[in-house]
Amino acid sequence: MVGVRDDGRPLFLQIAEQLEDSIIDGSLPEESKAPSTNELAAFHRINPATAANGINKLVADGLLYKKRGVGMFVATGAREALLERRRNAFAEKFIAPLVVEARRLGIDTEDLKKMIDTWGDDS
């Protein structure tokens, strides 16, 4: 796990995002035990309440659930839910402005697809 950094966003959101990244990349698989609040706080050298806020965000989003007396676990379907959410965010942040600019430049959909295929070609 990478440490939090001062990027202007609240630390609890950075903690939540790092846990999300671990779910997406499979290092924190579905139905596995998530790090505890104290583990996160010690690792990142932050207040346990801040770490708890990050975990609670993921609980509120339905990505983690609590097993009483055992800890927090990754919910079934969490990875797919995160992938869908991030794909949508990617489309809003990158694809929508790309399409708007392409239209402004007179680039039709087929030419835009060809441009993307050319840039994405590894050969």
Image: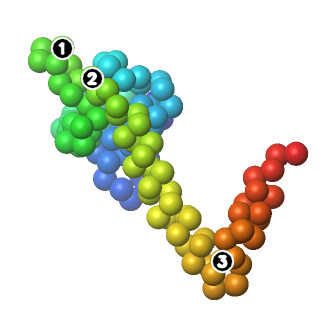
Q: Quadrant of residue 123?
A: top right
Task: Looking at this view, name the residue that lies furthest to the right.
Answer: 123
Determine contact: label 3, label 1, CB under 8 Å.
no
Q: Which of marks 2 and 1 is in front?
A: 2
Name the mark on residue 73: 2
Query: Sequence-wise, which precedes: disc 2 or disc 3?
Result: 2
Which mark lies nearer to you, 2 or 3? Answer: 3
- Horizontal arrangement in the rendering, residue 31 relative to residue 93 (left or right): left
How far apart are labels 2 and 1 at the CA level? 9 Å
Question: What is the CA distance from the residue labelled 2 to the residue labelled 3?
Answer: 44 Å
Q: Position of residue 57 (x, y in %)?
A: 23, 43
Residue in the foreground of this view, choosing between 118 and 71: 118
Tell whether label 1 touches label 2 (CB within 8 Å). Answer: yes
- Depth check, mark 3 against mark 1: the one in front is 3
Indicate the position of residue 14 as horizontal and vertical percent values.
37, 46
Q: Name the residue under label 1.
A: 70
Left or right position of 14 against 99: left
Instruction: Tell me which amino acid carries mark 1.
Output: Val
| Residue at 39%, 42% in the rendered image | 82
Q: Which residue lies furthest to the front in this view?
A: 110
Seen from this angle, which residue lies furthest top?
70
The residue beneath circle 3 is 102
- Give the quarter of the image for residue 33: top left
Quote the CA–CA distance across marks 3 and 1.
53 Å
Residue at 16% in and 19% down = 67
Kind of residue sitting beneath label 3: Ala
Query: Label 2: few (<14), some or many (≥20) within 10 Å?
Result: many
Assign a secondary structure to mark 3. helix
Question: Is there CB contact under 8 Å for labels 2 and 3?
Answer: no
Between disc 3 and disc 1, whose residue precedes? 1
